[in-house]
Image (tube, helix red, strand yellow):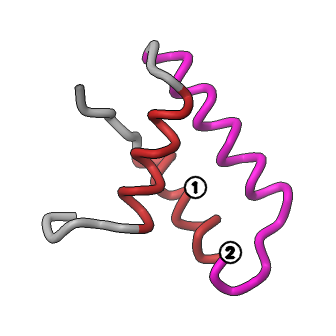
Amino acid sequence: MAIELTDELIALEEAAWAEQREGRLTVATAAAVQQAIAAHAAATGQSRYDVEQALKRRVRHPGPDA
């Protein structure tokens, strides 16, 4: 089953990933991403782990159609 990701989740992870690559990731940014992942997982009945992995794969390792 494919994990559906919201634009909000993707934007949060993109911001966190940019901060991390620049060496300036804050606890607040990381916490916001984790809270959004947990909320999305709970709302959709999916595993938090699966949502997080799909999100990171989408943002950090986009395929040719992304």
Q: How crowded is mark 2: few (under 14 residues within 10 Å), some or many (20 or more)?
A: some
Q: Is residue 49 left or right of residue 45?
A: right
**Residue at the image point whose x is 68% and y is 42% from the top:** 34
Q: Which residue lies furthest to the top in this view?
A: 45
Q: In this view, does 53 lie to the left or right of 2?
A: right
Q: Is residue 8 left or right of residue 66?
A: right
The residue labelled by disc 1 is 12
Kind of element beneath mark 2: helix
* Magenta-colored span: 20-44
Nearer to me, 15 or 52: 52
| Amino acid type, callout 2 | Gln
Q: How crowded is mark 1: few (under 14 residues within 10 Å), some or many (20 or more)?
A: many
Q: Distance between the residues labelled 2 and 1?
A: 12 Å
**Residue at the image point whose x is 50% and y is 58% from the top:** 11
Q: Residue furthest right?
A: 27
The residue labelled by disc 2 is 20
Q: Looking at the picture, how far across and down is residue 17, in whole percent?
A: 59, 69
Q: Residue 56 carries which label?
A: none
Q: Main secondary structure of the magenta part?
A: helix
20 up-or-down from 4: above or below: below
Q: In which quarter of the image is residue 58?
A: bottom left
